[in-house]
Amino acid sequence: MSVSSQLVWALVKKNNVYLHKGLNGSQFSSEPGNLYNRHSYKYSGLANEKTVDIRAGDDDSSLVISKRRPKNINKPNKAVHSVPTKKHASKINTSIAADLKHYRPDLTKAAVARASAVSKSLRVKKSKK
């Protein structure tokens, strides 16, 4: 039996383990599947059935793109499909935009921004001599 995403959001929006409250009233979230780390329904990885997560891979040069499969939501072992990539940053951005065009078009900009930030953090700066 599946629970509606609005009900899940109503349960987790005030208090959950991933919620970080700032001093000035701002709220951030560190949950997997939240691309902007904002505490909102649109970007929530807990409440939405279709989520996208981009993170650094095991080795120093790869990204892992994970998507949640809505049909396997009740099977945690099969619910998330992860694909490691070792492409150049511009090719990764193009493939993410094409992949999310039909999956979650509202998250395309956020996913490309997250992939750019993660790939930039993986680059090793050359030392000046």
Image: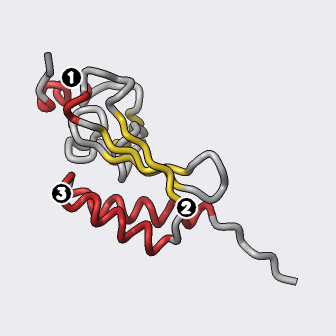
Q: What label sits on residue 86 in the rendered view?
A: 2
Select label 1 or label 2 by which is in front: 2
| Residues at discs 3 and 1 in contact (Cβ within 8 Å) | no
The amino acid on which the numbered mark 2 sits, given as a three-letter code, is Lys
Q: Which residue is mark 3?
A: 102
Ranked by sequence position, the earlier of labels 3 and 1 is 1
Ranked by sequence position, the earlier of labels 1 and 2 is 1
Q: CA distance from mark 1 to mark 2?
A: 38 Å
Q: Secondary structure at mark 1?
A: helix
The residue depicted at 59 percent of the width and 62 percent of the height is 121
Q: Which residue is mark 1?
A: 11
- Does residue 42 appear anywhere in the picture? yes
Q: Work out which residue is located at the far top of the displayed protein and give it.
A: 1
Q: Position of residue 44 (x, y in %)?
A: 28, 40
Does 124 sit above or below residue 83?
below
The quadrant where residue 40 appears = top left
Q: Position of residue 64 (x, y in %)?
A: 48, 50
| Residues at discs 3 and 2 in contact (Cβ within 8 Å) | no
Q: Secondary structure at mark 2?
A: loop
The amino acid on which the numbered mark 1 sits, given as a three-letter code, is Leu
> Relative to the observer, which residue lies in front, 53 or 44?
53
